[in-house]
Amino acid sequence: MPMKLLDCDAGIPEREQHVYIKEAGEDTTKFLPISNSATIPGSLSERGCAFCGAKLVIGGVLKDTIQMIHGPFGCSYDTWHTKRYPSDNDNFQLKYAWSTNVKEKNVVFGAEKLLKKSILEAFDAMPTIKRMFVYTTCSTALIGDDPKAVAKAVMAERPDVDIFVVECPGFAGVSQSKGHHVLNMGWIHEKVGQVEPEITSEYTINFIGDYNIQGDTDVLQRYWHKLGIQVLAHFTGNATYDELRGMHRAQLNVVNCARSAGYIANELQKQYGIPRLDIDSWGFSYMASGLRKVGDFFGIQDKVEALIAEEEAKWKPQMEWYKERLQGKKMAIWTGGPRLWHWTRAVEDDLGVQVVAMASKFGHQEDFEKVIARGREGTVYIDDGNELEFFEVIDMVKPDVIFTGPRVGELVKKLHIPYVNGHAYHNGPYMGFEGFVNLARDMYNAVNSPLWALAGQNIQGEVL
């Protein structure tokens, strides 16, 4: 069918080009929702800003790096401790928030001196930390501060420190996707190649697009270790600043989250000739397929098959138990971008769950191409969805559970519909064989909790 104008969007007819319902026999390339475009005025977007995409998603995950936010303190606070990405150094990156705390007088007179003072104070307060990211925000970009000049001056005074500047004010792009791009491209051009990694295996990779949410990196690292593969850099889960400077020596870039990570993988291929291999690490079938791709590249197919057999013997009985009880349940996925197409066939093939609606906050055209190709007929696809659209779609498809972030999650809980945190997980990790069992468990617990029925009961007037 053509693009769909929802009833709630009658006053914003432009939204018709952002909603599609898949039907049989259609050339879906003609009905891709418009994406990666500015939010239409009048539509209450669920997107984040470019700064958020750089700091919260990618840079803030590094375990040995000060994250200095050059702007008002609210920008720092809003991106602090909202993702569950642990590390093996006592979670340094989760404990602190740094900000230059720009005030009105700094906007008027300039804030470069304040930035230098803040950088030096941060290094002095944490003498064992020698690496820093500096992020511009809307206010400091608008007044024309030059953070790169400040960083250069500090590094000249203190040769033992290294600073990377990410110029990604919130207004730089239409969504957080722009922040992914700015950080990735800046890093490859300014920092990669500055450190020579120690090579300990004949097989080396960069694993790109894994941010160690609730221990995802630990699960995947066990697989690489059993296969004898050395990961030079995890981009950026449980990673160090200097590990990412040595990415140029890998034989292969294994890309998981293609939206936030694809930029740097493509540039590594252009500049250093490192081939790119995309995998999905959520779901039994996808994880096995991804491991086989890597095994084929290195010629270690026997090791891969042994690993898959071992993991499936351990976890498949539990997966089958959940599949029997989740068969036919309806699920909506309202997340950032790639997880729509990472998860849709994984939950349908491995759990028998029907994905009935998908909404992307920052997906691009190629993301919608993938997810619509993988999706079933009758599924609703939305770019940059708003609150009223979510209400209307819920009435249309009546999902049993929704995978989304806490903001929309709190909204749907008021409708007595369970949600699973698709951004930072409920009880992860969710990657790998073990992780997908965790995901199935959280879905099972969500749809079978008696609290939803109790929450819907009207007890007004009852005598307690």
Image (cartoon, rainbow, N blue to C red):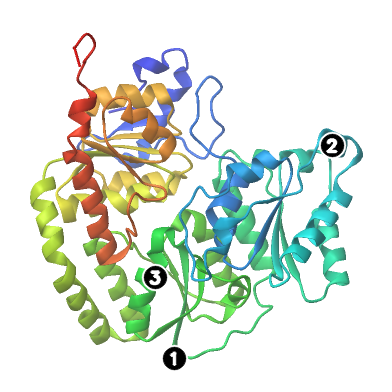
Instruction: Give residue 2's position: percent from left, percent from top.
Output: 32, 27
Residue drawn at point x = 48 percent, y = 81 percent:
251
Residue 370 appears in the rendering: no
Q: CA distance from mark 3 to mark 2?
A: 43 Å
Residue drawn at point x = 14 percent, y = 61 percent:
318
Return the mark for residue 107: 2
List the residue tagged with mark 3: 218
Residue drawn at point x = 85 percent, y = 45 percent:
111
Secondary structure under tag 1 reads loop
Residue 388 appears in the rendering: yes
Q: CA distance from mark 3 to mark 1?
A: 21 Å
Instruction: Give residue 139's position: percent from left, percent from top.
Output: 76, 38
Q: Amino acid at mark 1?
A: Glu
Q: Amino acid at mark 2?
A: Val
The C terminus - image quarter? top left
Q: Are marks 3 and 2 in contact (CB under 8 Å)?
A: no
Q: Amino acid at mark 3?
A: Asp
Return the mark for residue 202: 1
Q: CA distance from mark 2 to mark 1?
A: 53 Å
Q: Earlier in the sequence, mark 3 or mark 1?
A: 1
Q: Earlier in the sequence, mark 2 or mark 1?
A: 2
Instruction: Give residue 51's position: percent from left, percent from top.
Output: 63, 46
Secondary structure under tag 3 reads helix
Residue extending farthest to the front is 464
